Image (tube, rainbow, N blue to C red):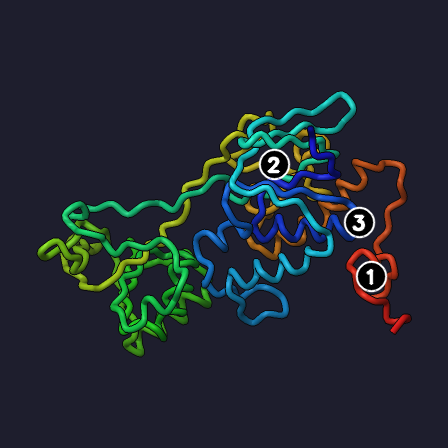
Amino acid sequence: MSIQTDVVIVGAGPVGLFQVFELGLLDLKAELVDSLPQPGGQCSELYPEKPIYDIPAYPSIGAQELVDRLLEQIAPFKPGMHLGQQVEAFEKLDNGRFRVVTSKGTEFDAGAVIIAAGLGSFLPRRFRAKGLDDVQDAPIHYKVTQRDQFKDKHLLILGGGDSALDWTMDLSGVASHIDLIHRRADYRGAPASVEKVKALAQQGSVSLHQGMITGVIAEDGKFKGLEIMDLEKNKTVVTGDEVLVFWGLSPDLGPIADWALDIEKKQIQVDTEKFQTSIEGVFAIGDINTYPGKKKLILSGFHEAALAAFGVQKYLYPDKRQFVQYTTTSPIMHQRLGVESPSKS
C-alpha cells in the first residue's frame, strides 16, 4: 500500500526540514526520507554542538538547537518521518506523479520529489597515519557531541576549513590548550574566523602549525601526540590528549546518481526560478544542487526551499493562480500554522 502525498523530500537536514514549512504554508503535505536515524543531517550527525553564526536573528545558535527549532516550526504540518532508510527506487509515472520506494520497502505515490540530501550519503574523511595501529583506543574524534568532554584537555585540531576554525574558537575556552594543524598557511574558512583564530594564537591559548602529519607518537600503547613535517621538511612532535579531525566529508550520491538527472561534479543542476532539475517535477535544494553563483550556505538553502515550494505548487496545480500570503496577516496562514489571528484576540 503506497503512502499518497504531495511531496517526498529526500533528506531531513535543516534545509529539508525548512522545506516542509514552506510547503505547509501552501497547504502541501510532505513526507521526509533520510538514511540517518535522526533528523538534522550533518548538523545532528557530525557537529550537534557546533555554533552557527549566520542564521538570521541568531548571533549564535548550536547546530542541534537549530534542528530542534526547525522541528518545532514544522510540527503543525505533521510531516511523515521515514528515517534510517534510503530511496532505492524512483520512477516517473505516465500521470506525472512519482513512485518512490525506500530500502525498507516504504512506498510513496508522490506528486513531486524534492532532493535535499546535502552531500548525499556522507562520511568524514578518516585519519590515517603511521603508528596509529599501535595505539589502544586512539582518542580520534570526527564530531563534538559534548563540549565538556574536552574540558581542560590539550587538543590537537586537524583541518583548515570552517569546522576546524569554528571548533578552535569555541573550544579555546574549554580546553587547556589547542594546537591547530593544517597542511598549509592559507586557511579555507571565513576570513573573520581566520582573524579570530590568529588573535587567539597571539594570546597564547592556540598554537598554529603548518605541515603534513607523518606519524602518531605512542608510549606503552597510549596516544601521546603527532609527528608533523613542516613546509621546510623539518619534523617536529606536537603532544596532546585528544585529536579532532575536520578534513571534510567524502560525498556519495548513492542511488540518486542513477536517476538520469543532469549532474555536474556530483551536484545536481537546477534552474534558479524554482530549483527544478532536468526532470520536470523533481527539484533539488541545498548543498546537493548547483547553478551559477551557488553558495553552500544554510541561508541559501532556505531561500531555495521557498522558491521550490512555489515551483512544486505550480507543477501540481498548473492552472491555479499563485500569490504570496504573509504569515503576519493572513488568516489562512494562521489556520495552517495553528495560531490565533490577531483579529480574534
Report the amino acid beneath label 2: Gln
Residue 176, image x and y in percent?
Answer: 27, 74
Q: Is residue 234 left or right of residue 163?
A: left
Q: Which residue is mark 2?
A: 269
Q: Quadrant of the C terminus?
A: bottom right
Q: Is residue 115 left or right of residue 281?
A: left
Report the amino acid beneath label 3: Leu
Work out whether 313 lies above or below 333: above
Secondary structure under tag 3 reads loop
Residue 143, image x and y in percent?
Answer: 39, 56
Residue 306, image x and y in percent?
Answer: 71, 51
The outermost residue toward the left is 220
In front of the other: 6 or 232: 6
- Circle 1 or circle 2, nearest the eye: 1
**Mark 1 neighbour density, 10 Å: few (under 14) some (14–19) many (20 or more):** some
Q: Which residue is mark 1?
A: 334
Label 1 – label 3 distance at C-alpha: 12 Å
Instruction: Residue at 86% x, 65% y: name it.
Output: 329
Q: Which residue is mark 3?
A: 26
Asked if the residues shown at circle 1 and circle 3 are in contact, with their CB atoms under 8 angstroms apart, the answer is: no
- Circle 2 or circle 3, nearest the eye: 3
Work out whether 271 lies above or below 329: above
Label 2 – label 3 distance at C-alpha: 25 Å
